[in-house]
Image (cartoon, helix red, strand yellow):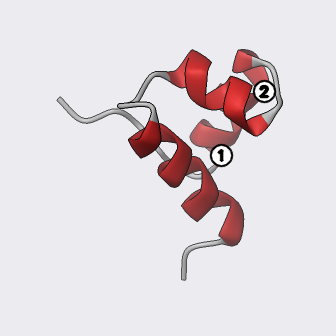
Amino acid sequence: MESVEKKHILSLLERTRWNVTAAAELAGMKRTTFSSRMKKHGIRKKG
């Protein structure tokens, strides 16, 4: 089952077309913190 945080991160990434910096800004955190959260949940850009 996906956590609320994972769903939120994916939602932000979709809104910003996978621009991690922009998604982090929307989340109100540093890019490095946002990237760490992505890694924690196994979220990686496909392609």
Residue 43 higher or lower than 19, as above or below: below
**Residue that carries the numbered disc 2 in the rendered image:** 33
Position of residue 25 measured from the top left corner of the image (x, y, whole percent): 71, 24
Secondary structure beneath label 2 = helix
Q: Quadrant of residue 18?
A: top left
Image quarter hosting the C terminus: top left
Image quarter hosting the N terminus: bottom right
Please report the residue visible at 65 percent of the width from the left and 46 percent of the height from the top: 40
**Residue that carries the numbered disc 1 in the rendered image:** 40
Q: Nearer the viewer, residue 38 or 26?
A: 26
The residue furthest left is 47
Position of residue 16 measured from the top left corner of the image (x, y, whole percent): 45, 31
Position of residue 11 measured from the top left corner of the image (x, y, whole percent): 50, 53
Query: In the figure, is residue 36 to the left or right of 33?
Result: left
Give the mark nearer the N terminus: 2 vs 1. 2
The amino acid pointed to by label 2 is: Thr
Q: Nearer the viewer, residue 18 or 43?
A: 18
Q: Quadrant of residue 2?
A: bottom right
Q: Nearer the viewer, residue 32 or 13?
A: 13
